[in-house]
Image (cartoon, rainbow, N blue to C red):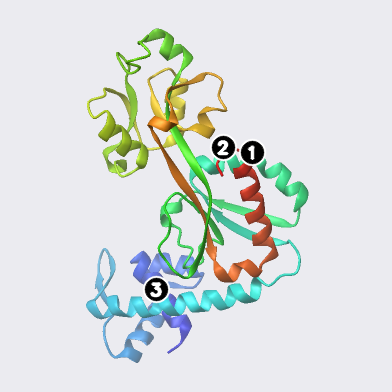
Amino acid sequence: MDWNDLRFFLSVARTHSLTKTASELKVSQSTVSRRIEAIEASLRTHLFVRHQTGYFLTDAGQNVVKYAEEVEEKVMLLESNISGLDLRSAGTVRLAAPETLASHLIIPALPRFYSRYPDIALQIITGVNTISISRHDADLALRLVRPKQHTLKIRKVGRMASAVYGSKTYLRQHPAADTHPLDGRSFITWDSSYSHLPSSTWLNETYPNSPSTLVTTSVVSQIAAVKANLGLAVLPSYIASQNSEMVEVIPTENVFAEDLWLVSHADMTASTRVRAVTDFLVEIITETELA
């Protein structure tokens, strides 16, 4: 069986579309169709149900996906072993990170990074939920949840503390006694689809009846809402502490802190460019007192 056929199969399985696969792999739609027919003929079974809304896996197709992804990972591992054994800090490094860490910690420090490593091209991906280190979608990832895959190199690099913050103006407009800091005050809260997030869980469990001024789907929006004097929010302390207008209402020791993990494939430790980015991330995390 040709690995290229499996590559076409996996793409169609993920996109449910010949057109999207053709665009992704930069071939014609007829080529994609021909490749799918070839692998089905080779296996003597139908892998997809053709529907007007797309291509959907049969039971046999579901089984083939598992094996195809194992082959994909081994091929990518081989490629990274070859491309990662560089002798100088040069080339591209793809880093997956939460948007808040990217915007408020990593990007502001990049001028210093590029002054040291002008030949490294850093690509930052903030859609971490769709990024798989196992599939080599990225070389490194900063994650707030420890991955379970044993094939990955996982290193704890810090703890990200959170606290409840409000703007000076909002707190002045809504005074409350120190013993009851939430009296007469509302929260900027998460949409219910984000109820699994630690900040949402903490607020729902600790103050389940707190009134909500605004519902959002991102930390960036919550920061903007606090700055606009709309209410209180549970925010990462390293971000809020950078803004002199934000005041800590409930301290982090009464809220929570999350472990921060740096994740990569074990084989990428041989890459000097990946090590350069790793060392720099640890440096700036330590400086920001996240370590």
Residue at 55 percent across and 41 percent down: it is 290
Position of the N terminus by quadrant = bottom left
> Do labels 3 and 2 touch, CB within 8 Å?
no
The quadrant in which residue 94 appears is bottom right
Specify whether residue 31 is in view.
no
Residue at 39 percent across and 79 percent down: it is 68
In this picture, residue 284 sits left or right of residue 163 = right
- Figure check: 280 above or below 231: below
| Residue carrying label 2 | 104
Residue at 40 percent across and 82 percent down: it is 34
In this picture, residue 281 sits left or right of residue 98 = right
Regarding mark 3 in the picture, which secondary structure is present there? helix
Badge 3 or badge 1: first in the primary sequence: 3
| Residue carrying label 3 | 10
Q: Position of residue 141 (x, y in %)?
A: 52, 56
- What is the number of the mark on residue 108? 1
Report the front residue among 36 and 276.
Answer: 276
- Figure check: 15 above or below 159: below
Report the front residue among 243 and 289.
Answer: 289
> Do labels 1 and 2 touch, CB within 8 Å?
yes
Position of the C terminus by quadrant = top right
Q: Position of residue 210 (x, y in %)?
A: 26, 24
Regarding mark 1 in the picture, which secondary structure is present there? helix
**Circle 3 crowding by C-alpha within 10 Å: few under 14, some 14–19, many from 20:** many
Report the front residue among 90 and 248.
Answer: 248
Specify whether residue 213 is in view.
yes
Badge 3 or badge 2: first in the primary sequence: 3
- Figure check: 137 above or below 211: below
Distance between the alpha carbons at the discs numbered 3 and 2: 36 Å
